[in-house]
Structures are given as C-alpha cells and as structure tokens.
Image: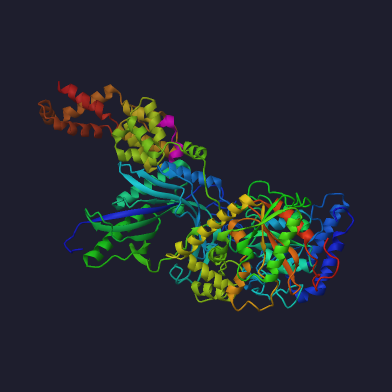
Amino acid sequence: MTATVTEWETVIGLEVHAELRTATKLFCGCRNQFGEEPNTCVCAVCLGLPGSLPVLNRMAVEYAMRIGTALHCRVQRSIFHRKNYFYPDMPKDYQISQYDLPINVDGWLELPGGRRIGVERAHMEEDTGKTTHVGGGGRIHDAAHSLVDYNRAGVPLVEIVSAPDLRSADEARAYVEELRAILVATGASDGKMEEGSLRVDANVSIRPAGSPDFGTRCEIKNLNSLRSLGRAIDFEAARQARVLEDGGRVVQETRHWDEAAGRTGSMRSKEEAFDYRYFPEPDLVPVEPSDEWIAAAAAAIPALPAARRADVAAAGGGDAGADAVVTVVRLDLDHYAQAVAAAGGDAALAVRRLANEVAADIESIERLTEPAFVRLVAMETDGSLTTAQARTVLKELLAAGGDPDGVAARLGFEAMGADDLAAVVDRVTGEHPAEWERYRAGEDKLTGFFLGHIKTATDGNADLKAASALLRAHRG
Amino acid sequence: VRAGRLQARAVLEEHLARIDAAEPQVHAFNLVNAEPARAAADAVDATVAAGHDPGPLAGVPVALKDNLCTRGVPTTCSSRILEHWVPPYDATVVQRLAAAGAVAVGKTNLDEFAMGSSTENSAFGPTRNPHDLTRVPGGSSGGSAAAVAAGFAAIGIGSDTGGSIRQPAALCGVVGVKPTYGLVSRYGLIAFASSLDQIGPFASSVADAALLLDVIAGPDPCDSTSLRDAPPSAAARLGEGVDGLRVGVVTELTGAEGIAPDVVARTRECADALAGAGAKVEDVSVPAAVYGLSAYYLIAPAEASSNLSRYDGVRYGFRADGEDITEMYLRTRSAGFGAEVKRRIMLGTYALSAGYYDAYYGKAQQVRTLIIRDFAAAYEQFDVLLAPTAPGTAFALGAKTADPLTMYLNDVCTIPSNLAGHPAMSVPFGGGDDGLPVGVQVLAPALGETVMFQVAAAIEAAAPPLAPPVMAPPGGGR
C-alpha cells in the first residue's frame, strides 16, 4: 500500500436480525411479546432448565420461508447447530442457530435505484435474553450488578446476511429500509428498530478505488437506528482510511458504536474472538419442508414494495419522481394513489401530496379516507382549489377528518368564479400599465410578475393556471 | 393390586421396610420420598376401591434415577452443582409412570451427570452392590440397579448413554433395557449426551421389564427426537420361544480384549441354550464395533461439554461468588463439578474446537455411520445378536477409579448400540467364578424390541440359578 492512494472505496456487508411476529417463541409455547414485565414470558424450555428440550415452532419456519422467498433465496433442507459461548443472558450458554445448512441461501434484494445486493443467507435462530447492567458505565465490565430479563430468550429471529455489495452509508441505509419494508410486507416481522425487533450489524472495510481485493473488515455493533448505521459507517471508513494513510494496518475486530460520542471503539480483536464450537443440535431433527409447504409460504406473500412501486409508477404516479413513489410505498400509502388512478385522477399529483403533506403527518393517517383523498385531488386538478388551498385542506383532513368540500367551504375556499378572477386580472394589469405594455409586446418573463400580484390580491385563492390563461387572452 | 388382591399401601410398606433395614449399607438412594409415596399408594387403593382402573403398574414401587426431573422433588444428578435444585416440572416418563399407577419411592444415586461405570463418581458417596457390599453396582444407573436387586423397589428407571442401564443390571443381577433411540421421551431427563441418551427400565424379570417399557414408550410432542409412530410391543411375544429365530454371537465383542473368561463362558452357554431351544445360532462379525469406544469418548464428551454449560451459577443451582462474572463462572464450575465431569467437559471442548472438529467429532460421526452399516449387514442374516454385557462381574470399590481408561473399557460391549441407536438389553445368566451375577446382552435392530424381549425371555428361562443378593430378604417384588 502506498501513501499516494487517496481515493478509497467503502465496502459494506450487513447482518440484519429480524424478530419474527410469531405468537409464541421459537422452541416453546411462551408468548412472544415485547414490553411485558421482566421474566413473565418464560418456561422450563426458554429458561434452559435441566432436562428441557426444544420443539421447533412451525410458524417460525413458515415466516422464515416467506422471507427467503421474498429475497429470491433458494429454500432448502436445513439443520440447527449449537453456537457455544458463555453469557449470562443466554440460558443454556449456547444459542440454537443455523450454521452450514441454513434454510435460505443465495438470494438478492433490489434497491429502489435498481441495484441488486446479494443476500448470502437468511437463517433461523433464537434470540437471547436482555441484560441491564446497573452501575458503572452500563457495560458488563464495570457494572456493580446486572439484571437479566429472559422474556426475549427464545424469541425467533431470522438473520439476513448480505454479500459485501454495499458501497456507501446511503446505500446501506437504503438496503435496510428496503429490507425492512419487505419484512413488514411479508408479515414476518414488524421491523421496529426502536424496539429492537430489527437489529443491524455492519461489516465495514475500505480498499483503493478500483481494487478487486477486499480490505480487512471490522464488525460494528450497537447500531440502533438508520442514523446510527449511516454515521457509524462514515466514521469507520474515515477511521480506516486514516489508519492506512498513516501507514498502519486495520486490525480485524468487533467495534462498538458510541452514538453519543459519534465514534466506534474496539470491543474484541480476532485473537480474542470466541471459538463457538459449532456442532449439530442433537435435540432437534432436520427441517425438511415439502415442496407444497414451500409453495404455500410463497403464496402467502402479498405484493412486495418493488412491485407496488412499479404499480404506482405504471398508474402515472412515476411522474412524481422515484423518491416520492418509494416514500408512498414505504408508508403503505400506495392504495390512496391507486384509488386516485382508478377514479381517473392525476396519480402523479396524488403521489406528490402523499409523499409530502401526508407523509409529514403519517400518525394521523387513520383520519384520511380514500374517497376524501380522491375528491381532494380532483378538486385541485379541476381548479376548484388552488395548490395552496389543496394543501391546507389536506392538512385539515389529517388533523380533523371530514370531506374536502365541507372543509373547503368552512375555510372559505369557494372557488373564485371566472368573472371575479377576470376582474382581478383587469385591475392588476391596469395598475401596472408600463409592465402591461412590455408584456403585450412579447416580454413573457413578466407573466410571473403579474401572477405574483394576482396571488397577493386574492390572498392566494386565485387559480393561477386560469389567471395565466386570462393574461394571454387579454394581451390579444 | 389391580385385581384387588393386594393393597398398594401394603406393598409399599414392605419395600419401605427393606429400605429401612438395608439402605444405610447399600446407599441406593439420594432421596427416599416415603410420605409422598404413601399418599400415592393410598390414592391407588382408593381408585381400586372406587371400582376404577388404577393402571397397568398400579401400586408398583418404582425407583427413579436422580437425573429425571420430578416436580417439587430435588433432582441432583448426584452433583454438588444441582444439590438443592427442585424442578418445576415432571419428566414425561415420570408423568407416564404416575398415570399408570406406579408409586415413586425415591431418587436413586448415579455417577455425577451419568458419567461413569461404578456409581463411585457421585458427589454424595458410592452405592454398593447388594450381592457384595465391597463391590460396585456398576453405573451410571447403579442406584436404580441396586434398588431393584435389593428389593427396595420392584422396578427402576435408568438412563443409558453408553451402557449405564445394561452394565449395572448385569453387575446387580437384574434385567436392564436400553430401548431404540427415540422410543422413550427424553423430556425431563437431564442431558448427558443428547444423541445417545435413552431412558429404560430395570426389573427383576423380563416380563416386568417389558410391561414397564410398554408403559413409558411412545411419542411425545415435547421431545423432537421421539419417534412418531406407535411403539412396538415389548411384551407381545414373551412366551413364544425362539424356535427358528436366527441369533448371531458378535465375535468382536465376545472375543474383545479384557473380557473375563467366565463371562465369555456364560455367553457361549447362553448361545448353546438358545440353540437347544430351537434357535439357529452362529458367530457373526460386526467389524466397526471395535471402534465404538473411541468414537463414543469423542461424541459423548463433546455433547456433554455443551449440555453442561448451563450450570454456570447465574440462574439456579450452586454458585460460588467471584469478583466478576468470569471469576464467578470459574469458581462455580470448579467447585460444583467433580473430577470425571470436568475431565469430560475438557475432552469434549477440545474435540469441538476450531481446527480439531473434523479430526475428532467429525471422524467419530463417520465411525458411527460405519457401525450402523455393519450392524445392518449383520441383521440381514440374524434376528438378534448376542454379546456379553460387561467385561467382568462386579469389581471392588476403588479398583478402577485411579485409571479412567480401565473404567471406560467397562462399556466396550454396550456402547455400539448407543452409537447405532439400536435397542439392547442385559439378562442375568448365572454367576461368575466369584459367584457374582453375569449378564448377557441381546441386541436388536431399531424398533426390534418385540423379538429382543422374546429372546430375552428364553434366556431367562434357561438361566442357571444364582444365589440371591445378600442384602435382599426373601420374597419381595410384586
């Protein structure tokens, strides 16, 4: 490596852990429920009591197959292994996971921009309990004592491992957003990063731009939000670049993201890494789903985000821009756009309103009915409401519900009659005779000047398209 | 009892009296649960009095190996680390026994976590052989074997990972059965080596053992490895003799190094007796069987090293405090486990380590496949196989504790069946030169329990008489 290299390429692979939305845990009948009193959803099996044995949850397998199918993986016969290491939140001091024969392999995920990211595997495993370290810095090393809640122990997870195909923090975020949307769409997971039901570890390395070889990677843990993910990747890539530019060597290690400090810190190096002593779990039998079952799992998958985006775009919503369509589908708003298109309305306008005003107040979405939204778009399109008025009415619909005609009437947004508008145009042109003469002589850029005055004169209630037409007509 | 001719309570009191008299010398039990047993016996009598069916084992006193979880009753595995642990649930087998009317009299001693062949590896002191108190009862289920031999209980439950039912049965002069892997649910059996462990019966007769097995066998949704189909009947053909059956004497096991001449002689006599009863008897070779011991001592410790990780002082059982979590782990496990358990955890941890897995654990699994293949070839020609159970009669306490390898060799004839997952049982067949019991082993293919018991019954009928145990009073049993 020479010091002359200045341009680095970041290489990222993500390991995403998604908790499955099963009613019960992976290997026992305990409820799989977030936010319960500590240690109330436990039994002999998920506490790993002596003599207890795991029995695989069929629905977890079904969800795992849905995820694999949605990620274009091959769904195959699989077995469980034991991953052995001592940690107090792991009741058996081993985790039942899948190792060299996972249920889903060799798939891909297409980013909204069209780039395909490889998915190496999506395997099943059990979650651990949750430890709270009391005292000290909140880490196990310096805590006075620790409390363990085993409600989460045995909750079913699918770990989705991407290929090292991602090249930037933005791309990594886009991947997680798209993956999250897919997981939610399949019904397999609720994808809530804030509740820990979706957790991301990032493997980050850098290499000289254009190099075919990979650099030494670091695994970053404790990424609790998309924001953390992006910041941590950018920090880590910059840190590695500094190390290399200073003539150093990146050490393969696990690093902890400190959100408050905005940096990664070393947790353990490769030399200190656990030897997990994987071996086939003798208490479980191989998972051998029949072709019929695999097909049934695939059939249970509703339309996925990519297909829904394509539908919205095909209905005319694509003219609003790809980002707007992505937002609309991500927020499950595409049915509004589809309803507008089905009613013969302007789908692109619908997508813009959904991606802006509606997305900004998504918590209030319950109040917005499909017919009300269809009518609102129609009113804006036919000029009964100006753009500004339409936005105001939409915000009001989200805030208080109701129908757009009623809301517009209440707000005094009666459509300005053609005669009234013509009178305003006459008045404004009469007040600015010099500009009017220049406009009549062909100076088109003055259109904006007059529309501005018309807008002011009408408190924004004028339909500017209609006003523009009147100006053109008047210049004769 | 079921017919109303005997009172369950009276039967129990007879057994409790024998326990009172001889248990201090034998030490078969970690815990005798007299009062709950009396309540259970009274309940059986009440069921009979009310005209209801009390079940096939009504009022039969049963001794449970102390690695079977019993709700509300301490379950220790004869280990300090679980000394005061009380399970919140019953093992499936314990539930089935209770449902069948059996009366649990107590929890029997074992080698710690079932690791051993003499019951000397118990944290609570050794069990002694009721036939000679200076000798071991075998192990690891030595407590259950001794309890049945001494008349403390009519039947017993053990677990067999490499011979832990059959070898003590042979040394104590009782019948001991390791069923097909998956025939009896392991739910609630504290695991030693999960892919080898199997629960099975002890009894003083082949018929009692068959009855007991038929009660505890069968599918269990709580054990993923339990077989889904209805189990074969052990008792179906007990009286039918062996005329026309093909019996193979396994040359590798009968002629193995270290098998005592008197044991070989009894095995041959047993084969002759079967031939005399009409069976077609020939020698047969099962070449891979000789590698069983080596493979076993990689697979069993490997699984044990993982199964025993959970005894870490965090959630239950013994804890030795430390400055930090690592020190707490180390102190707890150092003080809580005995020497043999630690030895096997280290062996197993090593066998699974990165870089060694293929050479040890992986290779051992290949041997396992070879053993299954060689047995399959033998069962193309024979209905059952015959071999010694243990290399010799009961040995003196302390005779083999100094050298683990000598102790391990005790299981050379029993281990192949565990590796193959096949059933095998030990039936008493006369005595050795020292007058102590000798057992011969009947091996059968997977789910071959019916023919295995059929042959065992014929062996029992032909067995030479043997002096009763010194510690057992006359009478007893059911």
Q: Nearer the viewer, residue A144 or B83?
A: B83
Q: Is residue A105 above or below residue A130?
A: above
Can the viewer see residue A403? no
Q: Residue B201, image x and y in percent? A: 72, 59
Name the residue: 48% across, 64% down. Answer: B360
Q: Residue B103, image x and y in percent? A: 78, 60
Magenta part of the chain? A363-373
Q: Is residue B368 above or below residue B321?
A: above
Q: Is residue B477 above or below residue B329?
A: above
Q: Residue B455, image x and y in percent? A: 73, 55
- Residue A451 left/right relative to B472: left
- Name the chief secondary structure element in magenta: helix
Name the residue: 18% across, 63% down. Answer: A2
The part of the image, by quadrant, that contains residue B342 is bottom right
The part of the image, by quadrant, that contains residue B395 is bottom right
Q: Residue furthest right?
A: B5
Q: Nearer the viewer, residue B110 or A370?
A: B110
Q: Nearer the viewer, residue B463 or B319?
A: B463
Q: Is A364 contained in the magenta span? A: yes
Q: Nearer the viewer, residue A44 or B228?
A: B228
- Residue A383 left/right relative to A335: left
